[in-house]
Image (spheres, helix red, strand yellow):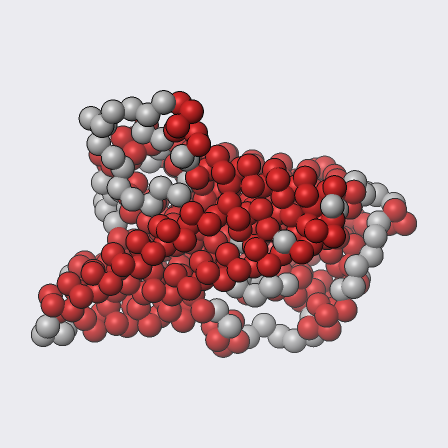
Amino acid sequence: MNITAPKSSQQPKKSTFRLIVTNLTFWVLIAIIAGILLGHFSPQNGVKMEILGAKFIALIKIFIGPIIFLTIVLGISGMGNLKKVGRIGVKALGYFEVVSTVALAIGVAVAYFFEPGKIDRSSLTLGDASQYTTNAAEHFSWLEFFLSNFTLQVLLAAIVCGIALNFYKKREQTILVLERFSNVVFLGLKYVMYLAPIGAFGGMAFTIGKFGLQTLIPLGKLMLCVYLTMALFVFLILGSILRYYKIRILLVLKYIKEELLLVLGTSSSEAALPSIMVKLEQMGCSKSVVGLVIPTGYSFNLDGTSIYLSMSVIFLAQLYDVHLSFFEILSVIGILMITSKGAAGVTGSGFIVLASTLTALHKIPVEGLAFLLGVDKFMSEARAITNLIGNTVATIVISKSERDFTELNLNPVLEEM
């Protein structure tokens, strides 16, 4: 993955074949296709490949803490204006809440228009949802959310250290040491990312091998609605936001295509977190904005997850022929505005959030979650990709609004890809 500065255009151009075979995007795509084929034609061997995807994500997670910490500390200490830190934080949280609410509303609207839940329940395969329905009675706790969210913990520690460093007498010497350490961390990340095809292959082979493509057929309409809604959200909502700042969404997607393929293969947006932070800095976003917005967004700006959660509630209501009044629909959006923030960082947390929402409504059977278990893994890629794009756009928007975006860096970088 290209996480180093763009090369000068004066260097001799490579042949098309060499450009393709030396591009990590090409190998990640090949790995995803190979994983699908293995999982479909040899499910037992496909399931065994889970360890490859899991180990790669575990390896990437080693870099998440240091990169977030160093980026934020260096960004805040180099900013010199602590009021700006607070302003960026407030602006980011406000943006997250507005856009996430729009995502929730779009999910509800599309689900009502296409009615994916108007199908025969007898044709569906039930999964075991007991572990999620049991936890549904537990109230959401912000303390537990914080204690289980490593990204937020590092974010808070980095903000405190960054602010404290501004008052430290040996600030310049400390910054030099941190910058050297940062260079070492990013160099290590560069080499680890060469393993991305292996991680994508393992993740995709496991998904197809365990759940099988045939599980998509009964809930195919729901799958299509989810993917369609997320595409509409990305190109219409996020695209319009970027267009206001005279940036085309397609150029941004082209720029982060390697990260998108990696997320598609591993079903985890965390796998792309370190490299997307580097890419955004290269694009022109300031280190301070990237350091504050991306880690916070991974917990509070889950656009894809918001769409999925709202559509799932309406899907289950339609599946059980439960009529929801306009007030109850607003209640669903209101509840999910709060509980969806707890759907980050913990496996299965999305189902727990759904179970909590259904319990609060007292109208839709919580046991209906069992119908979604079979296809949830296939929709997790769409959620993760949309979350990644949403946070990328958020960082660009905040950088632009802060006049902290280097205009000249964007188009040359994109044109060289």
**Residue 363 in which image quadrant:** bottom right
Of the 4 image quadrants, the one containing the C terminus is top left
Can you name the residue that lies furthest to the right here? 122
Of the 4 image quadrants, the one containing the N terminus is top left
Q: Which of 232 and 24 is in front in this view?
A: 24
**Residue 127 in which image quadrant:** bottom right
**Residue at (62%, 60%) from the top-left corner?**
350
Relative to 14, is 46 on the left or the right? Answer: right
Residue 85 pos. (x, y %): 26, 61
Q: Which of 387 and 276 is in front in this view?
A: 276
Q: Can residue 249 be seen in this view?
A: no
Q: Which of 406 and 38 is in front in this view?
A: 38
Q: Is residue 45 visible?
A: yes
**Residue at (30%, 68%) from the top-left corner?**
158
Residue 129 pos. (x, y %): 76, 64
Residue 388 pos. (x, y %): 47, 48
Relative to 365, is 73 on the left or the right? Answer: left
**Residue at (60%, 63%) from the top-left corner?**
347
Residue 262 pos. (x, y %): 50, 46
**Residue at (46%, 50%) from the top-left corner?**
195
